[in-house]
Amino acid sequence: MMLNLKLVQQYREQGYCFVPGVFDQVSLDGFRQAANELEDVVSPIERGKPRLQVEKDPDDGHAKLRMIEPLIDLSPTLRDLSADRRILGMVEQIFCEPAYLFEDKLNYKPARVGSGFPLHQDWSYWKRYSNNLLSLFIHLDDAPLETGPMKLVPGTHRMGLLKTEDDGHHIGLEEIARRQMLTFEANAGDVLIFHCLTAHESEPNLSDKDRRAIVITYNPCSDGNQYRYSPELLSTYH
C-alpha cells in the first residue's frame, strides 16, 4: 500500500491524511474476530484491571470495554497487523525511513455508552518520547455521525503544544479555530493517519452499533525503539 504524493504532502502540511478502503472484508472479519477474542481473554471486565479502560456507564447492567492497551502480544492477528505492509508502507513513505512500533490499542466505542474524548494532542501524554510519532486509526466498523467519529483540526501539528486546561491535556476551545475542525465519517477498512501534535477529539456513540477501531502508533527508526509498555504489563493475561 502506497500513498500518492498529494496525500503525503497533505500529511506534512496539515498533519493528517485519510486513506479509504485500505482493508477488505476478509481482513476486517479477521480483525473483528480478534477484537471479540480479546474481550474473552481479559474477562471479566472490571475497573482497575491491567490494560483495560472500562466505560463509565454500563449497558443494560453490563460493564463495557472502552479500550484494551497493549494488545499485540495477546493476539497473533493484531501482531501481524502491526507489521502489515499495507500500513507500514504508508508510514515509511511519510517518514522516508523504516519505523518502530510505539503503541497499540483497540478502542471499542460500544453502542449507546461509548464515551467521547475531549480535544487534545497525543504528544501531551508522550512528551518524554519522539515528537515525530504518527498514528493510524483503522476503522473496524462503519463510523457514521451518530457513532462519534474522529474529528481533528488541520495544521495544529505545526503549532507545538497548545495551551491546555487544568488537567494538563485537554485543549480549551478558545485556543484554536474550531470552525476548521473536520469530521471523518468513515467506512470499515478506511484509515485516518495523523501526527501526534494534531488536535483531535470524538463525541459519544449514541447509536445502537459499536464503532471499534485499532490505533497503532509508530516513530521513525532514527529516533530509536521507544516501545513504551513495561515487561510487567506485558506479562498479564499470559
Image: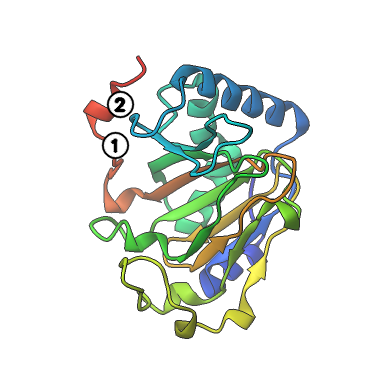
Residue 83 can be seen, yes or no = no
Q: Is residue 9 above or below residue 232?
A: below
State the image coordinates of residue 64 (x, y, percent, origin top left): 54, 34
Q: Nearer the viewer, residue 158 or 39?
A: 39
Asked where in the image residue 131 lies, by quadrant, the reply is bottom left
Residue at the (58%, 23%) spot, across then down: 34
Residue at the (61%, 59%) spot, across then down: 203
Q: Is residue 170 above or below residue 155?
A: above
Q: CA distance from mark 2 to mark 1?
A: 7 Å
Q: Which mark is residue 234?
A: 2
State the image coordinates of residue 186 (x, y, percent, origin top left): 73, 52
Residue at the (31%, 21%) spot, across then down: 236
Q: Nearer the viewer, residue 138 or 19?
A: 138
Residue at the (40%, 67%) spot, across then down: 170
User: In what element is the residue under mark 2?
Assistant: helix
Badge 1 amino acid: Tyr
